[in-house]
């Protein structure tokens, strides 16, 4: 159960529109409640390949291959997935490949699962250390524009960028029985 | 529990000859090579802008080949990697099966050892069967060959059969001269992108 704590906004639709506007074709993801609507939009789009992974690590290699072959891509994950990717980030860094991660945050205000806190608290710092620039989205209304700007820069400058979407934008997983 | 002994196997196939034979008929195929010996084997067969040899990111060879295969559906994409590298990203076989690009073929040169670190045994030395894992993951074809006759049949399949498929080739443990590809990732990136422009 996820309860939105901000006014209803179709921020996943705004992000999806940004992906379309930037001709993103390969959308790799590890299923996540926060990204569920965006994943549905991408799966419904015949111009996109929306591909579930067994681990976020696969997404770094996949998007490297995609871009080498001429496709743009994006990787959707939860903050817990950031840790899984650390060594694979070297591929994007050493080869100077464009990379865009969309990370839904756990372990922030209102989190009810303490096991999410270590990666939630450290995702931005770990990304920065690995050479991936973290950008925060703290309000639903900013999501689309932030992703559009990140895509523009990632593909213009071969930058590696992670957009971190605050837990308050996504909603809190309740665990109520 | 004791670790399996490494280096006891005496498979007849030699990795450099196997890779050279395969790549002699590659045409315009794109080749992704896993780090270590497979990258040196592919380079020994002839460096090419259409090769993308990895020097790190262990476990990424299949995902990288998959992204390429999806981006370039009219090109054959060969992933040539080792048993250790494949085991580190074994879940990618399920992802490749799910994505199902018909132009992707994966070759695992399986010497049952981590050759770059002193030939310590990999899990395949104890019986882990990568081709069986590939079949169970849903690849269209997945087989193991361990001799000339088997390789002769598999070669055609690797180069032309609709995939995604996987062939494990059991090869001997050997100490071979290093034949190194460029190690600058930007050079590898730019030459492949340029070769795909036309």
Image (spheres, rainbow, N blue to C red):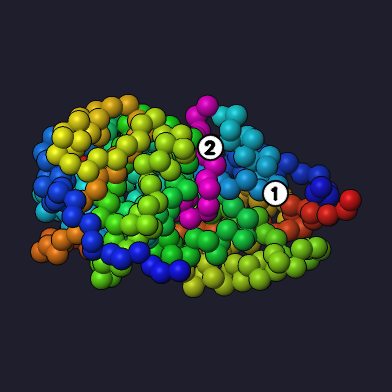
Look at the image and give the residue range highlighted in magenta: A46-64
- Give the residue displayed 28% in from the left and 64% down from the top: B6
Q: At which x and y percent is residue B47?
A: 13, 51
Q: At which x and y percent is residue B184?
A: 24, 63
Instruction: Say left or right for B198 vs B62.
Output: left
- Vertical placement of B92 versus A129: above or below? above
For marks 1 and 2 on the same chain, the one whose residue lies earlier in the sequence: 1
Residue B159 falls in which quadrant of the image? top left
Q: Quadrant of the C terminus of chain B?
A: top left
- Vertical placement of B138 versus A91: above or below? above
Instruction: Say left or right for B86 vs B25.
Output: right
Q: Nearer the viewer, residue B154 or A158?
A: B154
Q: Is residue B187 visible?
A: no
- Spatial CA distance of label 1 from label 2 is 16 Å
**SS for dot 2:** strand
Q: Which mark is residue A34?
A: 1
Residue pushed farthest front? B1
Q: At which x and y percent is residue B13?
A: 15, 47
Residue ID for mark 2: A50
Neighbour class for label 1 at 10 Å: few (<14), some, many (≥20)?
many
């Amino acid at each position: 159960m996820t309860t939105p704590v901000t006014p209803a906004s179709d921020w996943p639709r705004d992000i999806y529109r940004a992906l379309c506007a930037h001709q993103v074709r390969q959308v790799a993801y590890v299923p996540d409640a926060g990204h569920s609507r965006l994943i549905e939009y991408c799966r419904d789009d015949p111009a996109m390949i929306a591909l579930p992974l067994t681990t976020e690590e696969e997404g770094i290699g996949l998007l490297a291959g995609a871009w080498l072959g001429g496709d743009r891509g994006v990787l959707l994950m939860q903050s817990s997935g950031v840790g899984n990717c650390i060594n694979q980030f070297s591929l994007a860094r050493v080869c100077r490949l464009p990379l865009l991660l969309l990370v839904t945050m756990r372990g922030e205000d209102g989190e009810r699962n303490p096991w999410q806190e270590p990666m939630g608290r450290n995702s931005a710092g770990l990304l920065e250390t690995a050479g991936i620039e973290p950008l925060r989205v703290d309000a639903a209304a900013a999501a689309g524009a932030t992703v559009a700007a990140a895509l523009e820069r990632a593909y213009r400058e071969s930058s590696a960028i992670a957009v971190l979407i605050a837990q308050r934008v996504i909603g809190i997983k309740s665990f109520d029985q | 529990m004791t670790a399996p002994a490494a280096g006891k196997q005496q498979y007849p196939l030699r990795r450099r000859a196997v890779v050279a034979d395969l790549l002699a008929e590659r045409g315009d195929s794109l080749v992704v090579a896993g780090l270590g010996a497979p990258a040196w084997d592919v380079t020994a067969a002839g460096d090419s802008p259409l090769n993308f040899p990895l020097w790190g990111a262990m476990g990424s060879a299949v995902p990288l080949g998959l992204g390429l295969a999806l981006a370039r559906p009219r090109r054959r994409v060969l992933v040539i990697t080792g048993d250790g590298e494949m085991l580190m990203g074994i879940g990618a076989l399920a992802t490749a099966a799910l994505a199902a690009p018909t132009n992707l073929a994966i070759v695992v040169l399986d010497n049952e050892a981590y050759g770059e670190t002193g030939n310590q045994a990999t899990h395949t030395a104890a019986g882990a069967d990568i081709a069986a894992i590939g079949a169970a993951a849903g690849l269209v074809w997945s087989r193991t060959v361990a001799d000339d006759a088997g390789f002769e049949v598999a070669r055609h399949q690797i180069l032309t059969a609709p995939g995604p498929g996987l062939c494990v080739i059991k090869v001997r443990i050997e100490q071979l001269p290093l034949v190194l590809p460029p190690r600058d990732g930007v050079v590898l990136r730019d030459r492949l992108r340029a070769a795909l422009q036309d």
